[in-house]
Image (cartoon, rainbow, N blue to C red):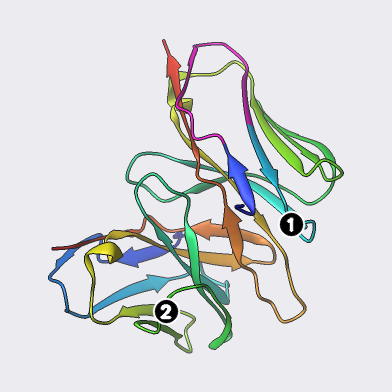
């Protein structure tokens, strides 16, 4: 079983729709949770970062973490064609020795249809 | 401020050759990590360096090595290249707990 599971999609929604992207994880030691957006043939871009259960909002994006269920989500409101990309969830355990390995999901490919 | 910069952008190598990839972190960031991303998969952790010391290593063979220099830039070296090493190699620069990635080096082994 992978430590982080993410539905690879692809996911296609019409412009203006609310998008929900999800990841589950098995390692209860994960403390930090991130969402990255990756355009084709580019490096991942950090979208959201959180370390506590609950919601964190930034513009049209909301990150949700439920540590008891080991489940994280990213919601995109009023989706735009420019949101079309692959979305990666990532998690980490920060040790006292500074080992800051990120464990990623496989990514969900999202297409927003104009 | 410049982001994380990686060079070269693209590279084609032959099986059995050696390759060196380079990364310059964001100014002030002392931690650099390397990841391998195969097409259709999420990035896989290879190495992490902090203050020129290796702080973490992923499940990769000894053909993979890295080092960090006094100016915090880093090199990833891969020996005896295999076809399966073809991937996007990503460098991440970290400040506290947020990691920022470069554009990557796309390595093709033929």
Disc 2 residue crowd, few under 14, some 14–19, many 20+, Cα 10 Å:
many
- Residue at 42% x, 79% y is B74
- Residue at 72% x, 52% y is A26
Question: Which label sits on residue A46?
Answer: none
Find residue A9 and report its horizontal and vertical position in percent: 48, 29
Classify residue A55 by image quadrant.
top right
Which element type, helix, strand or loop, lies under badge 2?
strand
Front residue (pair B83, A79): B83
Classify residue A35 by image quadrant.
top right
Find residue A41 and report its horizontal and vertical position in percent: 32, 45
Q: Give yes or no for contact between labels 1 and 2 (Cβ–Cβ under 8 Å).
A: no
A63 sits to left or right of B27: right
B17 sits to left or right of A105: left
Q: Which image quadrant: the C terminus of chain A?
A: top left
Find residue A74 and report its horizontal and vertical position in percent: 66, 33
Residue range in magenta is A7-21
Front residue (pair B73, B80): B80
Find residue B105 and report its horizontal and vertical position in percent: 30, 61
Front residue (pair B10, B46): B46
Question: Which label sits on residue A27?
Answer: 1
* Chain letter of the residue carrying label 1: A
- Residue at 62% x, 52% y is A1
Q: How much space separates mark 1 and mark 2, taking CA atoms?
A: 30 Å
Within the magenta stretch, is there residue B8?
Answer: no
Within the magenta stretch, is there residue A19?
Answer: yes
* Chain letter of the residue carrying label 2: B
Where is mark 2, residue-wise?
B74
Tags 1 and 2 on a common chain: no
- Residue at 38% x, 64% y is B5
Which element type, helix, strand or loop, lies under badge 1?
loop
Q: Is residue A106 above or below residue A73?
A: below
């Amino acid at each position: 079983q992978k430590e982080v599971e993410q539905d690879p999609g692809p996911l296609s929604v019409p412009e203006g729709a609310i998008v929900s992207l999800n990841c589950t994880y098995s390692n209860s030691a994960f403390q930090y949770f991130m969402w990255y957006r990756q355009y084709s043939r580019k490096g991942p871009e950090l979208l959201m970062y959180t370390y506590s259960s609950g919601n964190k909002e930034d513009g049209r994006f909301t990150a949700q973490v439920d540590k008891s269920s080991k489940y994280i989500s990213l919601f995109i409101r009023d989706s735009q064609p420019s949101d079309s990309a692959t979305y990666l969830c990532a998690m980490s355990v920060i040790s006292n020795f500074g080992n800051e390995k990120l464990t990623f999901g496989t990514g969900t490919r999202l297409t927003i249809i104009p | 401020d410049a982001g994380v910069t990686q060079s070269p952008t693209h590279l084609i190598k032959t099986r059995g050759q050696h390759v060196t990839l380079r990364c310059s972190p964001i100014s002030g960031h002392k931690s650099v990590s390397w990841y391998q991303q195969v097409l259709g998969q999420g990035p896989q952790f290879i190495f992490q360096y902090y203050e020129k010391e290796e702080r973490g290593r992923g499940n990769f063979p000894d053909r993979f090595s890295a080092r960090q220099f006094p100016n915090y830039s880093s090199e990833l070296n891969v020996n005896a290249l295999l076809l399966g090493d073809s991937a996007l190699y990503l460098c991440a620069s970290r400040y506290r707990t947020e990691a920022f990635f470069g554009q990557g080096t796309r390595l093709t082994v033929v």
